[in-house]
Image (cartoon, rainbow, N blue to C red):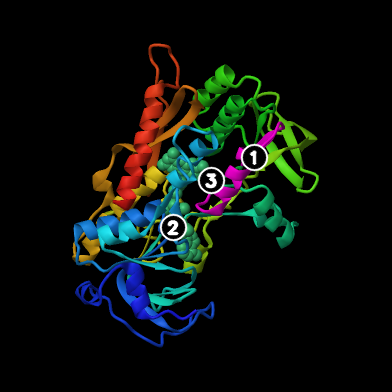
Amino acid sequence: MNISRRDLLKFAGLSAAAAAVTGCTAATGATPGAQGAVGKMLGKHQVVIIGGGFGGLTVAKELKKIDPKFDVAIIEKNDSFMSCPFSNCNLGGIKGVSLSTLTHDYSQAVEKNGYGMLTAVVTGIDRANKVVYTSKGSVGYDILVLAPGIDYNYKGQFPTWSDAKIAKARRAAPAALVPGGEHVALDRMVKNMEDGDVVITVPAGKYRCPPAPFERASMIANFMKNEGLKGKVIILNETAEVAKGAAFKETWKELYPDVVVHQDNCKIVDVDFDKKEITYVQTVFANKEDTEGVKTTKTLPYGIFNFIPHNMSNPVIEMSGVATTPDGFKKVKMATSPEKPVSFQTATDASVYAVGDVVGHAIPPSGQSAIWSGKECAKEVAHVLHGKSYSVASALPYKSANVCYSMVNGNPEEAIMVNHEFMVAGPVIGSKGSVPKGDEANNKFRSSGLAKATHDWYKGAMRDLFN
Ligand SMILES: Cc1cc2nc3c(=O)[nH]c(=O)nc-3n(C[C@H](O)[C@H](O)[C@H](O)COP(=O)(O)OP(=O)(O)OC[C@H]3O[C@@H](n4cnc5c(N)ncnc54)[C@H](O)[C@@H]3O)c2cc1C
């Protein structure tokens, strides 16, 4: 599909005059990229951001707040935004929460904040010529911000699975860890469920929002309890780690003792999506010194399967060719220097920055971290555009940089939380988390006050991104 520069401005909500003021320059005949993308050039911007999620929207808004003259454009593949945070509340049947609570249109954010937005899929990046190739043409940049979030690594986890089997996994057992239709599919499955077991897997390695699978288990258990459905919510955890572990375990024991079953060290071997059966190997270790353990192969039938595979950086990172860590996730390596020990600039290219779940900092991959990082990244980029210098280290240590709530009960509404302080930790930003007791009087992690805070956090985050 061909798209004209006028179409880009329409997406952007900018008039041609405003475009001139903000410094957009149209060009034609850009060199096609390695991906064989079309040569039609949609325009060039001072800052181009790939991804209109928690990180990307924050960078764009903050840049325009710092200097309305900055020419900023986001490239986002979806034409509307669907929030992963709060999606478990929808599955749990929390009063007043529905799929529409999670869905937001981009037009208000574009109108209010004055940045541009192109709805297109990024297909290639040519850093030498500072061009991003998309499904609708190419876009030039002075500074590029990578904020594409995560992808699933089915291929790495199951090298023998065919593309057809992976496609079946996506359809029949949606992971629902990225924005979009998977949340709609999982919602349909849960809301139409009958008696039977729900299985949720927790992957090894870095993955998006470590408490999310455990919050989801609690919320589906809450839904089953309220609907009088018989069955269990079985968590097959590839490791023994449980984010906010003490708080979740206290809740499961007290509220869902016969429903939530958490199994440690379970490696998924295969899934028969037609028979609805999971084969996995569970390792039981005798003690901390036991590194081998005893392995048992087990087969588990399921009614609903929320199959969360290994996570990795979105392929946009590989397209950009910036250096990444050698682990399966492939985090972006971040720049470090004596003047700026920590940064959102990539280690590879001074014109390319990264925010959100892909960053190589030791901070939790959360929406709140992405918002905090987006604000800091915008300050760094703004200083560069103004010919000045800014070090993120000057903002650190930062208390409560990441506050993350998990709803665990719907009747009455109760939630738990974790609070992270960020600090300089060698060449990266590090973090230290604590899980406070929400109900000190009764010595419990969960409380109704934290449930109210969960609602307030979500409203505040959406205000931050869209108003
Ligand atoms: C169930 C669940 C619950 C969660 N709860 C919380 C919570 O309570 N609190 C919290 O802080 N965090 C929570 N999170 C985590 C949070 O959603 C992520 O950490 C956050 O979205 C990361 O922001 P990001 O900008 O890196 O990625 P995203 O928000 O995913 O944004 C990336 C964007 O890039 C776009 N994109 C990708 N590829 C391309 C391409 N090729 N071309 C164009 N566009 C592209 C995507 O469509 C997407 O819009 C939760 C996550 C899940 C799954």
Residue 99 disc label: none
Q: Tell me the number on the disc at residue 192.
A: 1
Q: Position of 466 compared to 243: left or right?
A: left
Is ligand 1 less than 8 Å from the beta carbon at label 1?
A: no
Q: From the image, state whether disc 3 or disc 1 is nearer to you.
A: 1
The magenta segment is 178-202
Q: Specify which label sits upstream in the sequence, 1 or 2.
A: 2
Task: Residue at 28%, 42% (x, y): give it.
Answer: 396
Q: Residue furthest top?
A: 441
Secondary element type, mark 1: loop
> How much space separates mark 3 and mark 1, taking CA atoms?
28 Å
Q: Amino acid at mark 3?
A: Tyr
Q: Residue furthest bottom?
A: 29
Residue 380 visible within the image: no
Residue at the spot of label 3: 207
- Do the residues bearing badges 3 and 1 touch, measured as CB atoms within 8 Å? no
Kindly identify which residue carries mark 2: 80
Expressed as whole percent of the image width and height from the top left, the position of residue 204 reads 60, 42
Question: Which amino acid, by three-letter code, is at mark 1?
Answer: Asn
Residue 407 seen by the camera: yes
Q: Is residue 443 above or below residue 315?
A: above
271 and 428: which one is in front?
271
| Rendering coords of residue 78 (x, y %) | 47, 61
- The answer to if 199 sits in the magenta stretch is yes
What x and y, as percent, mark residue 218?
Answer: 56, 30
Asked if residue 273 is positioned above or below residue 319 in the image, the reply reads above
Asked which secondary structure carries label 3, the reply is loop
Image check: 462 left or right of 264?
left
**Vertical relation: 292 (above or below) 308:** above
Earlier residue among tags 3 and 1: 1
